[in-house]
Image: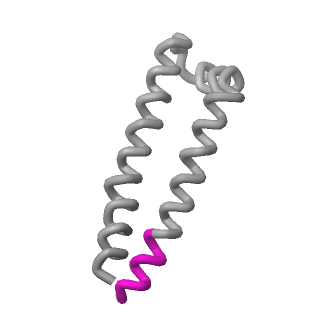
Amino acid sequence: MTIQTLQSFLAWSLVVHFSVLLLWVWMMKYANEYVYRIHTYWIPISKDSFNVIHYGGIGLYKLLIFIFNLTPYIALMLID
C-alpha cells in the first residue's frame, strides 16, 4: 500500500466520519424529541441522562476521529 493510497483512504474516512458526526449533532439539535422518543421506547431514561449520554458520545466520537483519522492523515501529509 502506497502513502498516496493511505492518504486517500484517510481523507475519505474523515469525510464519512465528519458527515456522521454532523448528522448526529444536527439530530440532537433539531430532532431531539424524536430521537428521545425512539430511544425511550426501548429503554426508559430521563431526558437529562439522555442528553448527557449523547453529548459525551459526540465528544468521544470527535476525539476518536481526531486521533485515528486526522492525526495520521496530517502525519502522512507532512512526510509526503
Q: Quadrant of the N terminus?
A: bottom left
- Point out the residue furthest to the bottom here: 2
For the stretch drawn in magenta, the main secondary structure is helix
Q: Nearer the viewer, residue 76 or 61?
A: 76
Residue 40, placed above or below residue 57: above
Residue at 47% over, 15% down: 49
- Whole-percent x, y for residue 44 in the image: 54, 14
Q: Which residues are magenta?
A: 2-10
Residue at 70% over, 28% down: 31
Residue 17, placed above or below residue 55: below
Q: Nearer the viewer, residue 48 or 39?
A: 48
- Colouring mode (rainbow / by chain / secondary structure / one colour): one colour
- Whole-percent x, y for residue 19 in the image: 59, 53
User: Is-magenta flag for residue 4?
Assistant: yes
- Point out the residue furthest to the front here: 78
Residue at 59% over, 45% down: 22
Residue at 55% over, 61% down: 15
Res 56 → quadrant: top left
Residue 58, placed above or below residue 16: above
- Whole-percent x, y for residue 68 in the image: 34, 58
Residue 44, placed above or below residue 62: above
Total numbered labels: 0
Q: Using residue 39 as the reference point, say whether residue 50 is left or right of it.
A: left
Q: Quadrant of the C terminus?
A: bottom left
- Whole-percent x, y for residue 7 in the image: 42, 77
User: Is-magenta flag for residue 35?
Assistant: no
